[in-house]
Amino acid sequence: MSGATRRPERYLGPRPGVSFPQHANNVVPLQTAVSGEFRINSGTIPIGVAPFQGNVVDAFISVNNCGRDDSNPLRMSGEVYINGTTIFTTIPCINANSETAGTAKTTAKHTDATNTTTGFDTGVTAGVLAGVDSGTPVSFKKGDVFTAKLFVTRTATPTTEISNAGVVVVLEPDYI
């Protein structure tokens, strides 16, 4: 057909006239990373904008090097905010190693091949999403802004600084 307007490609379901949202099974988490050593608290770090309405199903922080301090507290914790309101009732925290070289750590749950939770890294406090105890999910609307702040607790100069941190927020669409 010469001159006909071609329809855009779309994923078709079992009936050719029914199209499905393509992001339903391909949701990419919002994430950000900050390179370098952390000696002071971060400012506000933009993570992203919600591309749809839904719920936060997980959020965690990770570091490439958790640092080392043999005699003083050294830890990193992080807050995640939706439009300036925290999503946690317990914020995730990574404590430095003592007497060993710093290693990569995460507050994410470790799972096995069957997706069963097997635990967390040593010296880690997992974040608890607000509303988990009451069964109310942390919800957001399309266009909400996600930000984070990272906090460093230290009393002296450590042997090895905390470095290269990342924040991940896993979103689930809310289809009505």
Image (tube, rainbow, N blue to C red):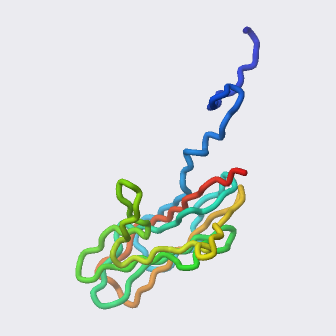
Q: In the rendered view, tell whether residue 167 sits above or below residue 151.
A: above
Give me the residue at 71% from left, 27% from top: 17
Query: Picture coordinates of residue 108 (x, y %)?
Result: 44, 66
Quarter location, residue 21: top right
Query: Picture coordinates of residue 119 (x, y %)?
Result: 37, 69
Classify residue 148 as left or right of residue 61: right
Give me the residue at 35% from left, 85% from top: 157
Classify residue 131 as left or right of residue 37: right
Q: Quadrant of the N terminus?
A: top right
Q: In the rendered view, tell whether residue 56 sits above or below residue 44.
A: above
Query: Picture coordinates of residue 139 (x, y %)?
Result: 67, 64
**Residue extending furthest top?**
2
Q: In the rendered view, tell whether residue 42 sits above or below residue 7.
A: below
Q: How many marks?
A: 0
Give me the residue at 50% from left, 65% from top: 167
Classify residue 60 as left or right of residue 7: left
Q: In the rendered view, tell whether residue 161 sits above or below residue 139.
A: below
Give me the residue at 57% from left, 72% from top: 129
Quarter location, residue 155: bottom left
Query: Picture coordinates of residue 101 (x, y %)?
Result: 25, 75
Seen from the viewer's position, the closer of residues 118 and 35 is 118
